[in-house]
Image: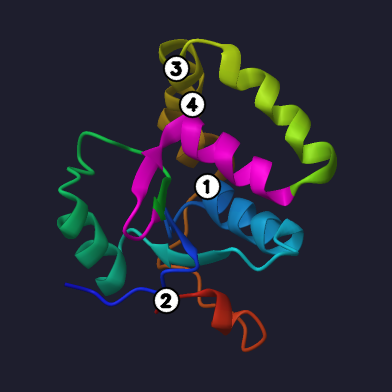
Amino acid sequence: MIDLPKNKKIILFDGVCNLCNDAVLKVIKYDTKNVFLFTALQSENGKKIIKQLGIDISKIDSIILYEPGVSYDIKSTAALKIMNAFGGIWTLSQIFIVLPEGFRNYVYDYIAKNRYKWFGKKESCMIPTPELKAKFLD
């Protein structure tokens, strides 16, 4: 069991994916309310959370948005909830929530399946700068 802050939402992401790492940096930029913490799926904390939630990441190639003690979301629903938390113009992204989840996830899965080919892959997980370290569980 991992002890997580109850007042934060945890974003689990693919730490070796360039697209995912760029998305994390964007979330940090727009997270003006300091709602999110991050951990790579490949990290020790990431593995513990995945095990605790009972998620088989070999079947779910996805970002995971976890609100400790409440629930978790994956794929397009997680992405839309993250954008909604930014407020402002980002709330317009919620128009996509009316689309069937199956359709949204089909688009999400297509991008996820091709992310390494289109955006590249790192040899190891991103190491946050000292300024960003407080935003990561690891």
- Which quarter shows the N terminus? bottom left
> Looking at the rendering, which quadrant does residue 91 occupy?
top right
Q: CA distance from mark 1 to mark 4?
A: 17 Å
Element type at marker 2? loop
Residue at x 25%, y 62% (from the top left corner): 49
- Residue flagged by tag 2: what amino acid is it? Leu
Residues at marks 2 and 3 touching, judged by CB atoms closer than 8 Å? no
Residues at marks 4 and 3 touching, judged by CB atoms closer than 8 Å? no
Magenta range: 67-86
Q: Disc 4 vs disc 2: which is toward the camera?
A: 2
Query: Mark 4 vs mark 2: which is more N-terminal?
Result: 4
Q: Disc 2 vs disc 1: which is toward the camera?
A: 2
Query: Mark 2 vs mark 1: which is more N-terminal?
Result: 1
Residue 108: numbered disc: 4
- Residue flagged by tag 1: what amino acid is it? Gly
Q: CA distance from mark 4 to mark 2?
A: 26 Å
Residue 137: numbered disc: 2
> Looking at the rendering, which quadrant does residue 3 occupy?
bottom left
Query: Mark 1 vs mark 4: which is more N-terminal?
Result: 4
- Which quarter shows the C terminus? bottom left
Left or right: 87 in relation to 134: right
Q: Give the residue pinned by disc 1.
A: 120
Q: Disc 1 vs disc 3: which is toward the camera?
A: 3
